[in-house]
Image: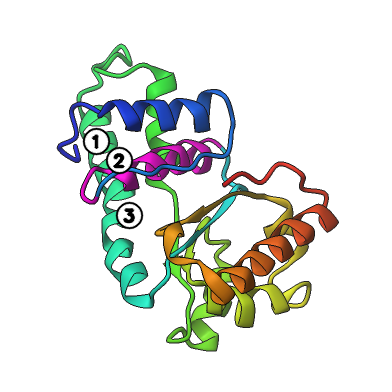
Amino acid sequence: ARGIHQLYRHQKEAIHAAVGEKKSVVVSTPTASGKSLCYVLPLLHALGQKKSARALVLFPLKALANDQLAKLKAFPEAARKALEAAEGNIDGDGEGGLNQTELKRLRGIAEITIRTCDGDSSEDDRAAIRAEKTQLVLTNPDSLHHFILPGYPRKWSKSFWANLTHVVIDEAHVHRGVAGSHFANVIRRVIRLCRVCGNDDVRF
């Protein structure tokens, strides 16, 4: 439905490591080589399987997060269209082109909620993210440091951190020098907070 018919070798290996082996993964390939799919597909798999699962995607710039928001939302939308088409083809005996497992997987992906939380987000926007239990939150290191991490436990509840399964760091190579060391400490705070909430299984 998204026009993706075949994966490159590095995409297959990254997805297998993330989904099949449940490992943290670093992808270092040239520009425009499809790195985004290396994290998008594992996120869709994890969030679609478990409604309570949460994920953070960190972009170095707000503009990148806003650009990716529409692209990421296109996947649940494509899943909804595929689901509607599949359910429309089911005959009187309950048989269609997809089996029940595949239909369940599509329903899970179709229901994934995605929002951005950054310096441009109003308090009402952030409240909506928490109230709607948004599964996939796009943000940046500064907003993670200033808005999200300090919000525990009054705003960003224990449930969010206990169910955080993935943290994606896009353009990780830009975090270097003094700024990179500060960013590393922010990530350590994420890991520590997850552990405080009983979550030792967050992957990157």
Q: Mark number for residue 72?
A: 3
* Residue 186 position in % (x across, y down): 66, 69
Between the residue at mark 1 and the residue at mark 3, the CA separation in whole angstroms equals: 16 Å
Find residue 82 and name its label: 1
The structure residue drawn at horizontal position 81% and vertical position 53%, both measured from the top left corner, is 195
Q: Is residue 150 left or right of residue 89?
A: right
Q: Which residues are magenta?
A: 31-49
CB-based contact (under 8 Å), mark 1 and mark 2: yes
- Residue 158 found in image quarter: bottom right
Q: Is residue 73 left or right of residue 151?
A: left
The residue type indicated by label 3 comes to Leu
Rounded to the nearest whole Å, what is the CA distance between mark 2 and mark 3?
Answer: 12 Å
Q: Nearer the viewer, mark 1 or mark 3?
A: 3
How many residues crowd around disc 2 within 10 Å: few (fewer than 14), some, or many (20 or more)? many
Check disc 1 and give the amino acid type.
Answer: Ala
| Label of residue 79 in the image | 2
Three-letter code, disc 2: Ala
